[in-house]
Amino acid sequence: MVDREELMQALDAELQPERFHDYCPNGLQVEGRREIRSIISGVTASLAMVEAAVEADADMLLVHHGYFWKGEPQPVTGMKRARMRQLLAHEINLVAYHLPLDAHPELGNNTQLARRLGFSIDGTLREDGVGQVGTPAQPMSADAMRIHISQVLGREALCVEAGDHSIRRIAWCTGGAQSLLTEAAALGVDAYISGEISEQTTHEARELGVHYFAAGHHATERYGAPALGQWCADRFGVHHQFIEIDNPA
């Protein structure tokens, strides 16, 4: 068991949310009980995720995608009310880290994805540490990389081929970071991986000569939250469980 304030201080010290200009508040978003014995981690605090935390009798729900995003309606009605009602009724703390969890050099989504794909890391894509640059275990064609990503993530990746060159240097940024393609290309990479694709991404990839892979927003961001949850378990001796709410994105 650990006091919530002690746990939050440790999380904030580790993830340093103050370094980021984010689209949402990072850290404790909904306050629950003070004593933390059990943590459930997940990607997104959907109603299904909240209900799973209730069923598991969790004291804290730790996610990458929480609430209170910039530009969203502020009234606590409808879908937002249904989610928060469950959290408040069962005194479950909701803790969310967005960009800080993308950028963490050990626990972050990008590092965790690189480990699974077998990429070495030799730099970051942005100055704040969001996104990474490195090399695959061996050079491979665009189609071979598509197959590799699909097999590792368990869902079909989309590939926009931009020539017939092999991939020796690669950049990646999980989630909805297709807009960073031009920044990746400026670093001289052969390919770039993110979660989503926009209409203009295809044209940009072809014109920049960089193979582009859309591997799924949810699919690329399944690994940071459980790594952070396990970090809490190892440091404070609390119970931790990752729960996957399937999402084809």
Image: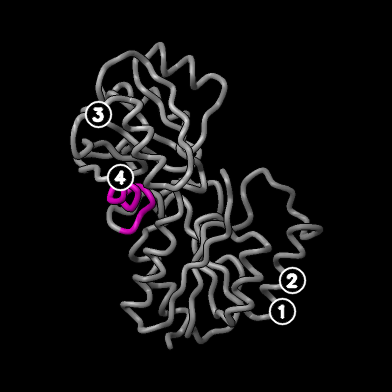
Distance between mark 4 and mark 1 Cα atoms:
40 Å
Q: Residue at x 74, y 49 (%)?
A: 73
Give the SS element for disc 2.
helix
Which mark is in front, 3 or 2? 3
Which corner quadrant of the image does residue 101 belong to?
bottom left
Q: Which mark is residue 85?
A: 2
Give the SS element for disc 4.
helix
Magenta stretch: includes residue 112:
yes
Distance between mark 3 and mark 2 Cα atoms:
50 Å
Which corner quadrant of the image does residue 240 belong to?
bottom left
Q: Position of residue 17 (x, y in %)?
A: 42, 56
**Which one is earlier in the sequence, the residue at label 4 or at label 2?**
2
Tell me the crowding category of disc 3: few under 14, some 14 to 19, or many 20 or more residues within 10 angstroms, Cα based: some
Question: Which of these two is toward me, 118 or 208?
Answer: 118
Question: Which of these two is toward me, 155 or 198?
Answer: 155
**Residue position marked by numbered label 3 in the rendering:** 140
**Which one is earlier in the sequence, the residue at label 3 or at label 1?**
1
Distance between mark 1 and mark 2 Cα atoms:
6 Å
Q: Which mark is residue 89?
A: 1
Q: Residue at x 50, y 38 (%)?
A: 176
Residue 187 visible to an observer of this rendering: no
Name the quadrant of the N terminus.
bottom left
Which mark is in front, 3 or 1? 3
Magenta stretch: includes residue 232:
no
Q: Residue furthest right?
A: 78
Q: Which mark is residue 195?
A: none
Would you say the residues marked 1 and 2 are in contact, meaning their CB atoms lie under 8 Å apart? Answer: yes
Q: Residue at x 76, y 57 (%)?
A: 79
Could you tell whether 116 is left or right of 88 in the image? Answer: left
Which corner quadrant of the image does residue 77 belong to?
bottom right
Could you tell whether 188 is left or right of 24 in the image? Answer: left
